[in-house]
Image: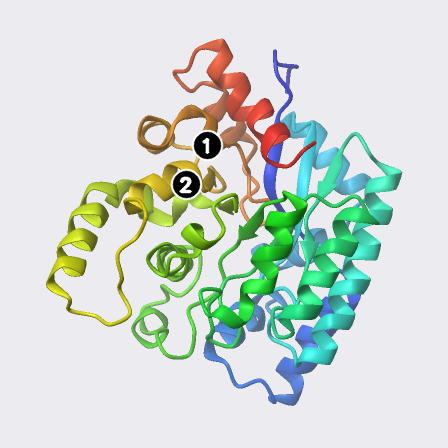
Amino acid sequence: MPKAKYLRIATEEAFATADLLDGYRRLLGEGTYDDPGFRSLWGFYAGHPGERAQFVIDRLPDLGERRLADMDRTGIDRQLLLLTSPGVQVFDGGTAVGIARSSNDQLAEAIRKHPDRYAGLAAIAPQDPAEAARELERGVRNLGLKGAVVNSHTHGEYLDDPKFYPIFEAAESLDVPIYIHPQTPSRRMIGPFLDRGLDGAIFGFAVETGLHLLRLIVAGVFDRYPKLQIVVGHLGEGLPFWLYRLDYMHAATVRAGRYETMKPLGRKPSDYMRENVVVTSSGMPWAPSITHCQSVLGVDRVLYAMDYPYQFVPEEVDMSDALPLSDQDKKKFFQTNAERVFSL
């Protein structure tokens, strides 16, 4: 790829450690974690002999020459690395805490070796919110990581539950974002998705993660933590296309007093999307969707991402380079927005 007038910073790029993948295989082999979404996702990637599964499983642990060569081949100057979904959130609390800490140490070492090519987000274990907050602080202050990744629900629980608020308190205090990355829908909602093979990235991921973000908004999380910044991929998991209806129906539902759990907010749902949420283009290199998000959220709230290695299509970089944007806005999209949001 030719050099551009901007750095191409990809902001949702997955990696895995050997102990994480070993843990997934152990859960699958023992059958002790009886979650249909996990079995669907990692039963495929950890055991299928086909080309796609092998490509992904070979590249996830590689933070060396092969990944760098793939980046060079597609003109990616820097990757923001996230521990792959579902991260440590499928394990028991003690195991999750240990793997998160080890993964963060290994990630920090890779960044030290290639400081101009990699940055990263800390893995945390929401199973123990207080420990998750401490690990986020260690990751940022001691390891130089740029925020945290949470792979959506944890055993069916969402971050709007007040027991998880220590994580938000730590993020706001450290002035770092939390990236809510998808995983398969929880046991309570996966059935109709799984029946038609729609539980993964084709649709289930977006539905589940969009739900998670909307729960945070209507629960008043951003009124309580006004400086908190949440990043979501795949152009906002559908929510930017629903802003008018979200505002209208939220106001109507609050006026009707229909739900005890839906209270008045300080602002409209769309205001929180524009002020507390950042979206990346991971897996969505399509000009109509990208420019729509820029028009409704603002050009400062939309970042480039590839979704490596799950969606590694070199031609998609060309598609993003060809966006009908001014030179200034294209540089924001590829480079300066990421530098601001993640303090690169």
User: Total label count?
Assistant: 2
Q: Is residue 57 above or below residue 81?
A: below
Q: Amino acid at mark 1?
A: Val
Q: Position of residue 121 (x, y in %)?
A: 68, 49
Does label 1 or label 2 sit earlier along the sequence? 2
For disc 2, the marked residue is 235
- What residue is drawn where x is 50% and y is 62%? 152
Label 1 CA crowd tier, 10 Å (few <14, some 14–19, many 20+): many
Q: Amino acid at mark 2?
A: Leu
Q: Considering the numbered disc 1 on the image, is that residue within a helix, a strand or a loop?
A: strand
Label 2 CA crowd tier, 10 Å (few <14, some 14–19, many 20+): many
Quadrant of the frame with the N terminus: top right
Q: Is residue 214 above or below residue 244?
A: below
| Residue 46 seen in the current view | yes
Q: Position of residue 200 (x, y in %)?
A: 44, 61
For disc 1, the marked residue is 302
Q: In the image, which disc is placed on residue 183?
A: none
Quadrant of the frame with the C terminus: top right
- What residue is drawn where x is 13% and y is 55%? 252
Camera-side residue: 307 or 293?
293
Whether the residues at callouts 1 and 2 have beta carbons within 8 Å, the answer is yes
Q: Is residue 146 above or below residue 190?
A: above
- What residue is drawn where x is 49% and y is 69%? 162
Q: Considering the numbered disc 2 on the image, is that residue within a helix, a strand or a loop?
A: helix
- What residue is drawn where x is 64% and y is 15%? 2
Q: Position of residue 6 (x, y in %)?
A: 61, 16
Apparent side of residue 218 relative to residue 68 in the rendered image (left or right): left
